[in-house]
Image: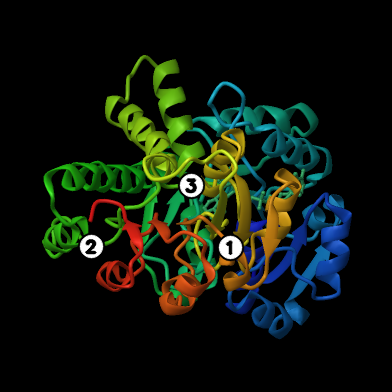
């Protein structure tokens, strides 16, 4: 049984903590957010993630939650840093939370420990982390990288069944010690140097973002030429060299990772004298893609004074995360153009309310559609996929649907008299 402490109880830190306890480790989870910790001590989760609550309850004996950083540092051999690395003002990652943790480690560490960076940090960040720790502590310690690849909405499943575990360290014996933690997962281990490990994370996210922007451009072309992007993606995806994942055309990628990680990679490439031309284009395509539904609506309707139903707020289904969600950009544009907005989402209402208090929010999807002049489908929630279009027809004032995720049956919608428009089909 390893003694592990994790800094940060967000999507990554909490899932990592709970899962590492499930596979036999003793874990102390630390956060500076006192309310979060108090709630976690009572078994109340700060985020929604399928299966997390059950796993937390099951492993209560091996899990501790505290704001006492010193306690966590002194009572563990391995310390994970899993705090946020949001986008900074210049496009690069903001490392202030990671640096805060480094400082607290430096002030409390008393013997050789392994410090594992799980947060997605710019290549080379370990130098700064080391410097900060050394300002307060002159003893021995090791820094390693172990980037995380879980996806929100399937985080437990992803953590427990990873395609690979990446361990970045060349320090004697450390890779084996870290691999031991993950032994029960029976996943391939990639052991490399710390910078390659960090770059594997960024390059993976950037590649997936590229796939999305690529298919979105093909969708826009297919629309002009009269093709169907779904069939095109299927035809491409069955080619094993290409693969079917991340070829769904839509309103662009969002979330807490792809946008900021693509930006950070472009930023640090520039700092180091390299231009990432493909990624610069990927970003531009994505920004334009987010507002395609608004353009489509403008062609069909006078938006000023119109009532628009926005179905889906979170950046993808099965999460409550709204960071960089395309819905926020769409709502912003529509409000600027004088629209009245009725919004529906199973998990994203509370968060969106704080940003857009003037929007009317509905827990019942059909209530959101009642009296609307048009509907924009932004997130592929099951409730949207399974909409009863006959009922929708009776409720809406005008029958305009912009399907930003290509989830409805186009033929059925058209047969019912909807002015239906998807993305690239
Ligand atoms: P998050 O914002 O959900 O959580 C971060 C947590 O860290 C918060 O609870 C915050 O209170 C806490 N924190 C901040 N400063 C602290 C400190 N000094 N001590 C202790 N706790 C502190 O972030 P997240 O989504 O879990 O992301 C964490 C990292 O993992 C980021 O680098 C992100 O890029 C990366 N990542 C995220 C995902 C994802 O899907 N969310 C996937 C892979 C990697």
Q: Classify mark 2: helix, strand or loop.
A: loop
Determine the image quadrant of residue 10. Answer: bottom right
In the rendered view, would you say 247 is above or below 184?
A: above
User: Is residue 183 among what the camera can see?
Assistant: no
User: Is residue 349 among what the camera can see?
Assistant: yes
Rendered location of residue 23, percent (x, y): 57, 77
Q: Mark 2 points at which residue?
A: 244
Q: Mark 3 points at which residue?
A: 254
How packed mark 3 is, by other alpha carbons closer than 10 Å (few <14, some 14-19, many 20 or more), is many
Give the CA distance from mark 3 to mark 1.
29 Å
| Label 2 or label 1, whichever comes before in sequence order | 2
Give the CA distance from mark 2 to mark 1.
38 Å
Residue in the picture at 73% in, 46% down: 358
Rendered location of residue 118, percent (x, y): 57, 50
| Label 3 or label 1, whichever comes before in sequence order | 3
Determine the image quadrant of residue 181. Answer: bottom right
Q: Which of 137 and 339 is in front in this view?
A: 339
Residue in the picture at 32% in, 48% down: 212
| Position of the C terminus by quadrant | bottom left
Left or right: residue 198 compared with residue 307: left
Left or right: residue 364 compared with residue 43: left
Which color scheme is applied?
rainbow
Q: Nearer the viewer, residue 180 or 359?
A: 359
Q: Name the residue under label 1.
A: 371
Q: Classify mark 1: helix, strand or loop.
A: loop
| Label 2 or label 3, whichever comes before in sequence order | 2
In the rendered view, would you say 363 is above or below 92?
A: below
**Viewer-side label of 2, 1:** 1
In the rendered view, would you say 66 is above or below 357?
A: below
Q: Which of 343 and 46 is in front in this view?
A: 343
**Viewer-side label of 2, 3:** 3
State if disc 3 and disc 2 touch (CB < 8 Å): no
């Amino acid at each position: 049984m390893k003694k592990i402490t994790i800094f940060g109880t967000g999507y990554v830190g909490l899932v990592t903590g709970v899962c590492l306890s499930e596979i036999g480790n003793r874990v102390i989870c630390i956060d500076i957010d006192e309310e979060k910790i108090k709630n976690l001590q009572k078994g109340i989760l700060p985020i929604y993630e399928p299966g997390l609550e059950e796993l937390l309850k099951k492993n209560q004996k091996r899990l501790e939650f505290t704001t006492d950083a010193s306690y966590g540092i002194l009572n563990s051999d391995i310390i994970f840093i899993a705090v946020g690395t949001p986008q900074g003002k210049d496009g690069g990652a903001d490392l202030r939370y990671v640096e805060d943790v480094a400082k607290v480690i430096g002030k409390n560490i008393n013997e050789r420990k392994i410090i594992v960076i799980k947060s997605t940090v710019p290549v080379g960040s370990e130098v700064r982390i080391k410097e900060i720790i050394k300002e307060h502590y002159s003893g021995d310690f090791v820094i390693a990288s172990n980037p995380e690849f879980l996806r929100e909405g399937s985080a437990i499943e992803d953590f427990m069944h990873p395609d690979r575990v990446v361990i970045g360290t060349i320090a004697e014996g450390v890779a084996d010690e870290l691999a031991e933690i993950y032994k029960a997962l029976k996943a391939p281990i990639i052991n490399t140097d710390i910078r390659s490990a960090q770059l594997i994370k960024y390059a993976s996210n950037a590649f997936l973002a590229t796939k999305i922007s690529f298919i979105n451009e093909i969708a826009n072309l297919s629309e002009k030429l009269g093709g169907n992007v779904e069939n095109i993606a299927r035809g491409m995806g069955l080619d094993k060299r290409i693969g079917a994942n991340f070829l769904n055309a839509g309103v662009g990628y969002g979330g807490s990772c792809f946008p900021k990680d693509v930006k950070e990679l472009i930023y640090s490439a520039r700092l180091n004298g390299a231009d990432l031309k493909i990624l610069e284009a990927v970003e531009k395509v994505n920004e334009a893609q987010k507002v395609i539904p608004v353009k489509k609506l403008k062609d069909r309707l006078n938006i000023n004074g119109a009532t628009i139903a926005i179905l889906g707020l979170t950046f993808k289904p099965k999460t409550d995360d709204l960071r960089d969600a395309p819905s926020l950009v769409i709502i912003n544009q529509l409000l600027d153009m004088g629209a009245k907005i009725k919004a529906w989402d199973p998990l994203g209402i509370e968060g969106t309310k704080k940003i857009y208090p003037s929007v009317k929010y509905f827990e019942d999807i059909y209530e959101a559609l009642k009296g609307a002049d048009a509907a924009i489908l932004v997130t592929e929630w099951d409730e949207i996929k399974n909409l009863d279009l006959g009922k929708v027809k009776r409720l809406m004032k005008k029958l305009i649907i912009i399907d930003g995720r290509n989830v409805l049956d186009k033929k059925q919608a058209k047969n019912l008299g909807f002015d239906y428009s998807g993305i690239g089909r």
